[in-house]
């Protein structure tokens, strides 16, 4: 009789789990790039069950083309995309129906990087030098503003498109500096190759601070209940990570141990965790308006959009 009771108890528990799984709302999340420590709270929310606790089943998708996720979400072919604040403004200016609903990293990660062994000790030393870049547009304007802040012009340097080989182009001496490096990754990548990096931060040279990584949804869907639940799970995951960084690292790499458990990610993890936004929902209206004005002045966008058209603060 005892064995029969245990059997039915286990059967009922399994049935309850199946019913819970069936009841969970599905969400597709399109990342900006392959999984890395920038996505710490997303992965930990998945691995620790914070999404499931909110009644969500989240499909995390790594893009083959990093430019596509916002476009797919705008077209209704995905629920949420990881995006960048400057890119969002350009996409909205082009007519894409996108709205920012949350923030992953609320400060710039972008930097201009040179090797410590170079003779470039200040930005003024870039005159006559070669600077590598990956993406034209915002990075061009960012660099132009940094140079003008120290009395230089874009014509004073030679720009070279190195695609995504930023660190490699520095190491091979194809260029003297690179713009677009992430301050929590490339310095470690260079260090692992035996080189020390020197970084110049855009926000220290006239560029307004901006949010590096944000979440966007299709306009009109920002008030869906599942979006609020998604953000709640991320806030729970962020709090857990900051309280338990060592254990959270193990939770993170358990998602894809062979790909994630390496020295570069381990170092980047330590730099990234303090940068994660505690309040994912919070919208800094002044910051958004300053960045929009900078992009208008830089002719990256044609008109200054109304803030509530492309960014909101989602309620609990």
Image: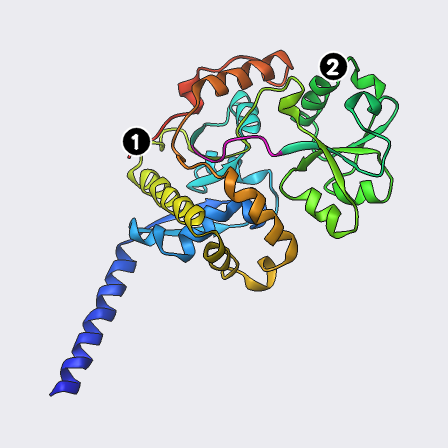
Where is mark 1, residue-wise?
A: 315
Residue depicted at x 55% and y 49%: 62
User: Which quadrant of the structure image shows residue 278?
Assistant: top left
Q: Are marks 1 and 2 in contact (CB under 8 Å)?
A: no
Q: SS for tag 1?
A: loop
Residue depicted at x 78% and y 51%: 193
Q: Position of residue 46 (x, y in %)?
A: 41, 54
Q: SS for tag 2?
A: helix
Q: Is residue 313 on the magenta stretch?
A: no
Q: Is residue 104 on the magenta stretch?
A: yes
Magenta highlight range: 102-109
Task: Check the image and name the residue furthest to the left.
Answer: 1
**Is residue 72 visible in the rendered structure shown here?**
no
Q: Position of residue 129 (x, y in %)?
A: 86, 27
Mark 1, mark 2: which one is toward the viewer? 2
Q: Position of residue 84 (x, y in %)?
A: 55, 32
Q: Position of residue 102 (x, y in %)?
A: 42, 34
Horizontally, residue 45 falls left or right of residue 62, namely: left
């Amino acid at each position: 009789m005892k064995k029969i009771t245990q059997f039915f108890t286990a059967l009922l528990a399994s049935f309850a789990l199946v019913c819970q799984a069936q009841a969970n709302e599905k969400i597709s999340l399109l990342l900006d790039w392959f999984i890395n420590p920038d996505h710490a709270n997303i992965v930990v929310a998945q691995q620790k069950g914070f999404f499931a606790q909110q009644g969500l089943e989240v499909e995390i998708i790594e893009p083959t083309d990093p430019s596509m996720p916002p476009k797919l979400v705008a077209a209704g072919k995905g629920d949420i995309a990881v995006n960048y604040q400057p890119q969002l403004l350009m996409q909205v200016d082009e007519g894409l129906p996108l709205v920012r609903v949350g923030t992953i990293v609320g400060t710039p990660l972008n930097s201009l990087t040179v090797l410590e062994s170079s003779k470039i000790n200040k930005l003024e030393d870039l005159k006559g030098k070669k600077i590598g870049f990956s993406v034209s547009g915002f990075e061009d304007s960012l660099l132009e503003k940094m140079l003008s802040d120290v009395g230089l012009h874009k014509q004073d340097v030679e720009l070279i498109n190195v695609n995504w080989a930023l660190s490699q182009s520095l190491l091979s001496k194809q260029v003297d500096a690179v713009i677009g490096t992430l301050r929590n990754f490339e310095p470690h990548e260079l260090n692992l190759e035996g080189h020390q990096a020197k970084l110049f931060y855009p926000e220290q040279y006239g560029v307004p601070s901006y949010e590096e990584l944000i979440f966007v949804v299709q306009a009109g869907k920002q008030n869906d209940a599942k979006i609020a639940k998604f953000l709640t799970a991320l806030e729970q995951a962020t709090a857990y990570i900051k309280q338990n960084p060592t254990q959270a690292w193990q939770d993170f790499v358990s998602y894809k141990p062979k790909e994630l458990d390496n020295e570069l990610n381990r170092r980047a993890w330590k730099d990234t965790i303090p940068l994660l936004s505690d309040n994912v929902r919070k919208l800094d209206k002044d910051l958004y308006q300053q960045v929009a004005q900078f992009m208008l002045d830089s002719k990256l966008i044609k008109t200054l959009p109304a803030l509530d058209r492309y960014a909101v603060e989602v309620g609990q």
